[in-house]
Image (cartoon, rainbow, N blue to C red):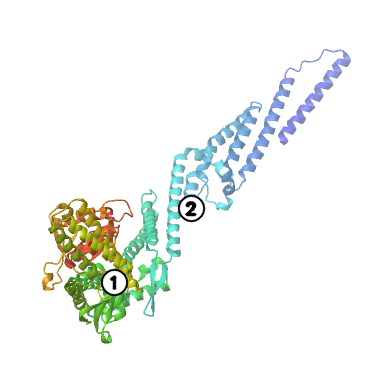
Amino acid sequence: KAQIEALKAEFDEVEKACAEVESECDHFGQPLPPFNSREEVKRDLAGFTGAMELTEEFTASLEKISSEDWLSFRGRLWEFEDFVEHWLEKARNCPAGPVADSMKELLHTLKDVAPNLKLVRGDGFESAHWHDLFRKLGIERVDLAKLTVGHFIQASAKIVDAADDLKQLNSRASGEVSIREALAEVKAWAQDTNFNLTDYTERGRTTPLIKDWKELTTQVSDMQSLLGSLKESAWFGPFAEEVNGYETKLAALDEALAQLNVIQRKWVYLEPIFGRGAMPHEAQRFDRVDTEFVNLLQGVKEDPRVLSIVRVPNLRETLTTMLDQLERCQKALADFLEEKRQKFPRFYFIGDDDLLEILGQAKNPEVIQSHLKKLFAGIYKVRFGDENKSIAGMCSLDGEVVPLISPVQVTESVETWLSSLSDLMRATLSDALAGTLKSRETNLERSSQQVLLVSEMIGFTADAERALSEGGGRALAALKATLVQRLNEYTQLETDSALVETKLKALLLDLIHNMDVVDQLVAAGTVDAKEWAWRKQLRYYAPAQARGSGECTLTMVDASFDYTFEYQGNAPKLVHTPLTDKCYLTLTQAMYMGYGGNPYGPAGTGKTESVKALGQAFGRQVLVFNCDEGIDSQSMGRIFVGLVKCGAWGCFDEFNRL
């Protein structure tokens, strides 16, 4: 700047001298001397002065932006691009000359480096990345707090030349940042994730149990997937040791959780069983597992962090042994229960817990009462003899009491006395039927509803066939009159007993159906018991009733079945309709040919109830199973074994779901 001022001053002296010469020439009338290069020098000086002033202004602006702190400025790289564009525009109006050329050359260099500055931003750079960057650009190692824009302006040419290397350095830094973030996430999960526990209390002892297994195993799986994805990175090398360490821990945790989940479920199932003294020969084995399991869970409660469990000494061997011992206990239990079910097949239709409670409390009347209704269709409870050591009778839900022909002794062998109860139930009903048939009396007070209904049906079958053998017509009309008279007697009978009223309702429904059968026979002009109108009816026979036998046979067309004397209690009867007759006819003929039946129709139309009503008419135990996703081939196998062994019918509701 001083040089420019000196040149201006010198030129001003020349201008002043020229002016004096011109003045004197004019004064003396002399011609003006030619100053040929004066204007040219004036123009050159003006251009040089303008270029220098612009250069000084540019230099000041460049120094200002060069002094900016790089870590702050790197987020505003657009300002640098604007700076370059602004000065390129100004440089176009700069007078030509070496000064302008030098400034323009620098600006074009800055323009080339501007888009590449993003490669040196250093986002996610660690110390090693910065050192590599400085080495590639020839920048002396400097503290990041003192790093300025000027450092990179001075290395502009190297930034442009090393652009490919810088891109690779950024890719490496970015990849390593992703790996570090993933590792930080895994580390945070390992430190912060705890087991969710709940207290399980049994017989005064409280044991912490793990809950939310699905959520926990999902999280472990997610962490394993995250670590696995890191291995695909090109920059995985420096982190391999740390990642492999976490993978080993998570694999051990995943295996431990899978085993511990199964162990906990088995323990929760078996603990109440062995806790109340069942299967003493396996108790010692279970006690060892119980101690180890409780101690392990107590340790989890003290340090609930999920990964802390893998630090338990010999965890894998401990869990494997516990699982093996529990499976042995469970197998021994299953074999024990199967043995009991083989001896008393009705046990197939109750769960293991109920069966174990029955077996463990064989002489406890209250326990026996609570489970009998699950084993017998009509027995709601039983009447005990002296000191609850024997069973004297069976009772229905409505209060009907049927005394057994001989008492059943209650012993420790529960399957034995339950089998005796089952046999005596049938023998009692058979004997009662024989007595009723022999006396030909309808005693609503003393006789059970089931015996009354069967004896009435046997009597109606005999009366109808007698009328048909007499030619039908008038004989059937006389039979109808007898039935109407009996209907009037029943309807006029007054009673305060709810049980007698229930029996009357059942008798009335059968009586009305029998009257309808007679009307059908009359309408069809039936004169022989071999005609279809009679053969299609469900008929009851007591072939040996003259000898007082309680045997009973049911016949429908060509199909004949023995009445099985399963106590039905006071189950409500189904109203008989023509559709009921068709249903009965189809099912009986199917069974006669060795098939099953499949009533089909919309929901709520009585399919299941019709099957149950037919079973009730046969004196059969009918077990209804609601088929859903929980029934598998093993469950079906157990159900079929039970049905076959105890001669019951199985009604599989929603069978098409299987």
Badge 1 density bin: few <14, some 14–19, many ≥20, Cα 10 Å:
some
Task: Write down the residue under mark 1.
Answer: 373
Left of 564 or right of it: where is 221? right
Of 508 and 650, nearer the camera is 508
Where residue 496 sits in the image (x, y, percent)?
A: 36, 74
In the picture, the disc for residue 126 is 2
Q: Quadrant of residue 321?
A: bottom left
Element under label 1?
A: helix
Q: Quadrant of residue 345?
A: bottom left
Work out which quarter of the rendered image holds the C terminus and state it: bottom left
Q: Residue at x 11, y 71 (%)?
A: 546
**Observer able to see residue 313:** no
Where residue 614 sits in the image (x, y, percent)?
A: 23, 60
Q: Residue at x 18, y 53 (%)?
A: 533
In the picture, the disc for residue 146 is none
Q: Give, as a three-letter code, the residue at label 2.
A: Glu
In the image, residue 531 above or below residue 508: above
**Residue reaching furthest front?**
474
Query: Disc 1 vs disc 2: which is toward the camera?
Result: 1
Of 236 and 210, nearer the camera is 210
Of 360 and 15, nearer the camera is 360
Where residue 101 sits in the image (x, y, percent)?
A: 60, 29
Work out which quarter of the rendered image holds the N terminus and state it: top right
Of 495 and 418, nearer the camera is 495
**Residue reaching furthest right?**
27
Q: Quadrant of residue 87?
A: top right
In the image, residue 96 above or below residue 371: above
Question: Label 2 near label 1: C-beta < 8 Å?
Answer: no
Where residue 395 sits in the image (x, y, percent)?
A: 28, 75
